[in-house]
Amino acid sequence: MHPAYSIIFFTTASGAGYGLIACAVLFGVSGLVPVERPFGIGLLGVASALVIGGLLSSVAHLRRPERAWRAFSQWRSSWLSREAVLAVATFVPLTVFGFGWMMHERLWLVPGLLAAASALATVHATAMIYRSVRPVRAWSSPLVSAAFLTFAIAGGTFLAATIVTVLGRAAPIVTFVAILATITAWAIKVTYWRAIDRPDPTSTRETALGLQGRGRVTPLEPAHSHPNYLLEEMGYVVARRHASKLRRIALAGAASALALLLTALAVGPGMIATPIVLLATGTYFAAVLIERWLFFAEARHTVLLYYGAG
C-alpha cells in the first residue's frame, strides 16, 4: 500500500495518546504517580493533545473533510465508524476523570476505568480497520491487533515515564512498566514480520485460475500500458533489502531508546535526567514512525496478481 503520511502520524500519535490515557488512569488510581495537579495536567494534557492532533490529521487525509461527520453513522457495520464513535466517546469519561484528578476527588475511579477501556477499544477499532481487509495478507492477522494495542501501551508508558521524570519525581515502577511494554510490543512486531515474510501458497495466479500444480502461470501481456490508481495505491513497491534495513534501524532505535531510559532512571530525577529521557522519547517514536511506515509499505493487495505480481 502507498504509505499516507497523515495516516502514519494519526495511528502513531493517537495510538500513543490513547495508550497514555489508559496508563494515566491505571497509574493514577493505583498511586504509582502522585495524584497532584501538575501530573494530571502533564499526563492528560499530553494524551489529549496527541489524540486530537492525530484525529485532525486523519480528517485532513479525507478527500472531502466536510463529510467526516458521516463516519459516525455506520457504526453497526464499519470499524472506521466504530473508531470514530469510540474516539469521541472516550472524552466524556476522560473529562470527568480529569476533573476529579484536578480536584483530588476519589469519585473518579469509575469514569477513569471507563476512559481507559474506551481508549483501548478505540485502538482496537483502528487495528480492525486494517485487519478486516482480507485481500491484504499482511493485515489479515491477529498479530495486527496485538501490535496496535501493545504499541499504544508501550508509547503511553514511555510518555508517562518521560513526564514523571521531567516533573522531577522518581517513579521507577513506571519506567520498568514502560521497558516491559516496549519489549513486548517489539517482540510481537518481530513475530509479525517473520509471519509476513513466509511465502503465501493460498493466493497465486495459479490458484486464482484453478491451475495449481500445473506449472507457473505467466501473463502474455501487461494488464495496462500505463500506471493506474490500483497500481499506485495498492502496489507500492519497497525493495526487500530496503525493508530489512529499515526494520533493523527501527529495532536499533527502540533498543537505544530503552538504553537511554535506563540511563535516566539510573541518574535519577533532575537536570541531567531530563534531556536524556527526552532524547529517549524522541528516539523511540522515530523508531515507531519507521515501523508504522513499513506496516503500510509492505502490505500488498491480491489485486496485484492481475497485474503480474506474485
Image (cartoon, rainbow, N blue to C red):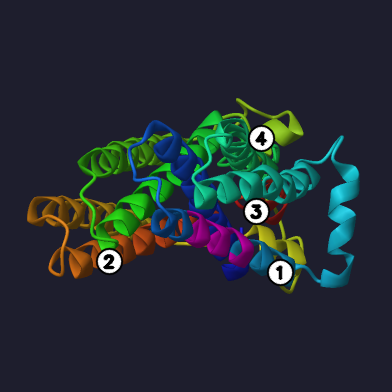
Mark 3 or mark 2, earlier in chain? 2
The residue carrying pointer 2 sits among few (fewer than 14), some (14 to 19) or many (20 or more) residues within 10 Å by Cα, namely many
Whole-angstrom CA distance, mark 3 to mark 2, is 47 Å
How far apart, in angstroms, are the residues tagged by discs 4 and 3? 12 Å
Q: Residues within 10 Å of mark 1 (few under 14, many from 20)?
A: some
Image position of 296 (left or right of 246): right
Residue at numbered disc 3: 308
Q: Which mark, by number, is residue 206?
A: 4
> Is residue 216 something one can see in this rendering?
no
Instruction: Write the residue at 57% across / 50% down.
Output: 98
**Quick check: can you spot residue 226?**
yes
Q: Residue, x 49% and y 45% (percent of image)? A: 104
User: Gap between marks 1 and 2, in whole Å?
Assistant: 29 Å
Q: Between label 3 and label 2, give the one nearer the viewer.
A: 2
Give the magenta-colored segment's residue range: 44-53
> Position of 92 compared to 199: left or right?
right
Rendering coords of residue 238 (x, y %): 47, 62
In the rendered image, residue 284, in percent from the top left (x then y), is placed at 32, 58
Give the label on residue 61, or none.
1
Q: Earlier in the sequence, mark 4 or mark 3?
A: 4
Q: Amino acid at mark 3?
A: Gly
Q: Which residue is mark 2?
A: 278
Q: Is residue 11 magenta?
A: no
Report helix, strand or loop for mark 4. Answer: helix
Main SS class of the magenta portion in the image? helix
Of circles 4 and 1, the one toward us is: 1
